[in-house]
Amino acid sequence: MPGAKAELCVIVGSGCAGLTAAVYAARGRLNPLVIEGMEPGGQLALTSVVENFPGFPEGIGGYDLVDSIRRQAERFGARYRSSVVSRIELDRRPFVLHLEDEEETIEAHCVILASGARARTLGLPGEKELWGKGLSACATCDGAFFRDQRVIVVGGGDSAMEDAIYLTKFASEVHVVHRRDRLRASRIMQDRALGNERIHFHWNRVPTALLTDAEGKVRGLRLQGTDGGVEEELTSDGIFYAIGHEPNTDMLGDALPKDALGYLTAHGVVSKIPGVFIAGDVADHHYQQAITAAGTGCAAAMEAEDWLQAQGLLQV
Ligand code: NAP
């Protein structure tokens, strides 16, 4: 019988948003099941030190932070499943979540979508090994490690300009590599970056290889001119990708509305489908901070609790 064994609440994603939702849902007796996803711990788990999460004056390791929230939720009864949701049927009740390659399904009365966004990468060989070790997509998280060093920022949008400007606080030189001869960034960000004498622009260049030294540390980028002509090496101690993010919404198809950038849109954390709530970066291309993700995770779980109660599905 459909629904007989349905979960009360399934949380999709185990970053800051999903795990905070798990803390609140578990304490609210929703017995949440967290499907951890492709990157357990989300983007935060890939961040070396988090210095802007309130409550940690000395900073805290990104992995340590998400692991603490994970254990906190577990203490109240949250359960975890190491798997990836490949598809969700939101036009049925209970909802049906397909795991991995469709081999298994889970039914759920209520779903909290906290699948996050992933930084776009260039797909160059060695990226995985260097990630968090000189190669990053988060200047705010990792910039301070490059005091008095040379760094490269790849990209020409607002994020790249913001990162480049931010990095001048620490780095001695910031080199922006962009694939065109004009920036995509807003005029004000362009003016600020172009007017900053510590930022050097390399136009019409695409990275073709990550360069490492004998110890395997980042040494720079090999660049190719977009006309196919020039090939050169640009040395640096750190590399920051700022070529945009992609929200993880593939599993939803067109079930929920998205904005022009592909992020989910909702009324706060409440989606247009009753029983489906949204938290974290999957619906946020603006703030994208651990603390804002945690805040929406909390709100989504509280909404879920109210909704399940109103349906008579939650015993008080
Ligand atoms: P974005 O606007 O999509 O810019 C991405 C940049 O990366 C573009 O310059 C793009 O080049 C380049 N790029 C993309 N794929 C690439 C590849 N494979 N190889 C090399 N370069 C590549 O992304 P974003 O900068 O993250 O901004 C996202 C949104 O957030 C935007 O709406 C932005 O305005 C907003 N935002 C605003 C602020 C602010 O106002 N302070 C700060 C951050 C973000 P092309 O230009 O050639 O396409």
Image: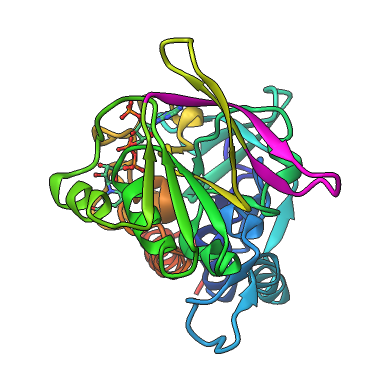
In this rendered view, identify the residue nearer to me: 223 or 277. Answer: 223
Q: Is residue 279 visible?
A: no
Q: Residue furthest left?
A: 187
In this rendered view, identify the residue nearer to me: 182 or 55. Answer: 182
Q: Is-magenta flag for residue 219?
A: yes
Up the image or down, 292 lies above or below 209; here it is below
Q: In which quarter of the image is ligand 1?
A: top left
Q: Residue 119: image x %, image y %? A: 50, 42
Left or right: residue 81 compared with residue 304: right
In this rendered view, identify the residue nearer to me: 159 or 191. Answer: 191
Up the image or down, 92 lies above or below 94; here it is above
Left or right: residue 53 compared with residue 288: right
Task: Determine the main secondary structure of the stretch shown in magenta.
Answer: strand
Magenta part of the protein: which range?
204-220
Quarter of the image where one finds residue 165: bottom left
Up the image or down, 74 lies above or below 216; here it is below
Residue in the image at 40% along x and 57% along y: 288
Quarter of the image where one finds residue 86: top right
Residue in the image at 55% along x and 55% along y: 150
Q: Residue 243: image x %, image y %? A: 42, 37
Q: Residue 98: image x %, image y %? A: 62, 30
Which quarter shows the N terminus? top right
